[in-house]
């Protein structure tokens, strides 16, 4: 009996594994021409000033509609990193964002910041900086409007290459944000030495802010930000209790479903029309 059950479990395990492998193959296949087929597009999630509740920026988040089903970026971005498609996708995200800035600012009636997620594979490409600068020049966008969101996984290997790259991006005018702050290999060393403008507190902290220990950690990150002259943004803000606590701690900016889900361009323009 036991052997039989074990055998079944074994079979099921293999079935799940091969389904997983099939799904990955399916996504790898799909990624080859997702851009050409126009299946990839952008969503924009508003970022809000805590004091005024005014919109100050948007984060660009990619969306993929494959055969009428949405594939989550959490699922396909890691695959695109492995296959290298992330390079083209990354250029697409930045270029599409830049192309839409004049329309967005005309309709909303104010200047915004535009946050773009940068993956490690992109960042470590030898020509990353050159390509990125070129897109800004081609679209005639002021670099200081663009916030490049990097994760701690990029700066974990705190090397000369990382330092020089970030310095060059900063000199060109880009702003730099640390995404998902506190979830990776957090180190004070990079905050001491790297040109960072914004810290994005990970949503796991925001959503546990009712716990006193979590609140103390968030408070420390925010005061660190104030002392280093960095802006602090809390991600994943979902309810009024979190808003009130982050406001009390003087967190500069907020982003999350409480204010808005990521929106299509059309809906962004409609919701925030001047
Ligand atoms: P991220 O950069 O940390 O983006 C925030 C994620 O949290 C987004 O998920 C957003 O939709 C979600 N979110 C925003 N507010 C809330 C909230 O109040 N509650 C909850 N539960 N979630 C919230 P999304 O769009 O599925 O993206 C997931 C991740 O995929 C992103 O995390 C980012 O790491 C990556 N990603 C998305 N777009 C791009 C892109 O264009 N390029 C690269 N390299 N990565 C991207
Ligand atoms: Mg991000
Ligand atoms: Mg994040
Ligand atoms: Mg993330």
Image (cartoon, grey):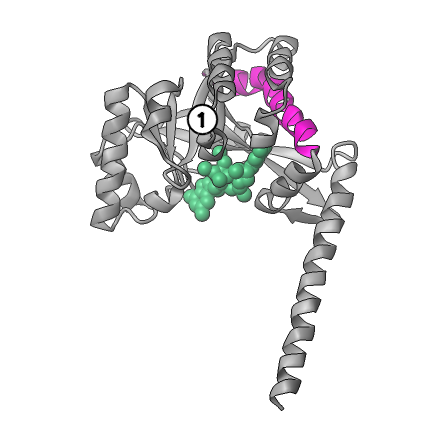
Residue 224 magenta-highlighted: no
The residue lying at 42 percent from left, 39 percent from top is 184
Q: Which of 242 and 265 lies nearest the eye of the viewer?
A: 242
Horizontal relation, residue 181 to residue 97: left or right:
left
Residue 106 magenta-highlighted: yes
Horizontal relation, residue 274 to residue 26: left or right:
left
Under circle 1, the secondary element is: loop
Ligand 4 has an atom within 8 Å of the beta carbon of the residue at disc 1? no
Quarter of the image for residue 50 reads top left
The residue lying at 39 percent from left, 21 percent from top is 196
Numbered disc total: 1
The residue lying at 69 percent from left, 43 percent from top is 65
The residue at the far bottom in this view is 1
Residue 112 seen in the figure: no
**Magenta highlight: main SS:** helix
Residue 111 seen in the figure: yes
Task: Identify the image quadrant of the N terminus.
Answer: bottom right
Horizontal relation, residue 241 to residue 181: left or right:
left
Q: Which region is colored magenta? A: 85-110
Read off the residue under disc 1: 158
Q: In this view, does 242 lie above or below 231?
A: below
Q: Is residue 137 above or below residue 6?
A: above
Quarter of the image for residue 227 reads top left
Percent across and percent down for residue 216 are 21, 41
Percent across and percent down for residue 32 are 78, 37
Percent across and percent down for residue 200 are 39, 32
Sort mark 1 into few (<14), some (14-19) or many (20+) by Cα contacts within 10 Å.
Answer: some
Percent across and percent down for residue 54 are 37, 26
The residue lying at 29 percent from left, 43 percent from top is 242
């Amino acid at each position: 009996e036991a052997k039989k059950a074990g055998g079944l479990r074994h079979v099921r395990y293999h079935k799940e594994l091969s389904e997983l492998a099939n799904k990955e193959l399916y996504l790898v296949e799909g990624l080859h021409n997702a851009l050409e087929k126009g299946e990839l597009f952008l969503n924009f999630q508003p970022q809000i000033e805590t004091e005024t509740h005014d919109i100050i920026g948007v984060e660009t988040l990619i969306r993929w509609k494959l055969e009428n089903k949405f594939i989550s970026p959490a699922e396909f971005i890691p695959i695109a990193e492995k296959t290298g498609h992330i390079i083209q996708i990354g250029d697409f995200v930045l270029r599409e964002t830049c192309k839409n800035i004049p329309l967005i600012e005309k309709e909303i009636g104010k200047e915004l910041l535009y946050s773009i997620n940068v993956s490690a594979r992109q960042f470590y490409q030898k020509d990353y900086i050159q390509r990125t600068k070129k897109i800004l020049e081609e679209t005639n966008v002021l670099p200081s409007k663009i916030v490049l969101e990097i994760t701690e996984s990029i700066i974990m290997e705190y090397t000369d290459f990382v330092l020089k790259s970030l310095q060059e991006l900063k000199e060109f005018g880009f702003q730099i944000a640390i995404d998902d702050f506190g979830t990776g290999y957090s180190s004070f060393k990079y905050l001491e030495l790297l040109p960072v403008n914004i810290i994005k507190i990970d949503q796991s902290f925001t959503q546990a802010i009712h716990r006193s220990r979590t609140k103390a950690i968030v408070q420390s990150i925010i005061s660190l930000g104030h002392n280093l002259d960095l802006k602090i943004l809390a991600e994943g803000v979902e309810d009024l209790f979190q808003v009130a606590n982050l406001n009390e701690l003087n967190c500069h900016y907020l982003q999350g479903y409480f204010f808005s889900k990521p929106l299509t361009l059309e809906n962004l323009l409609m919701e925030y029309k001047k």
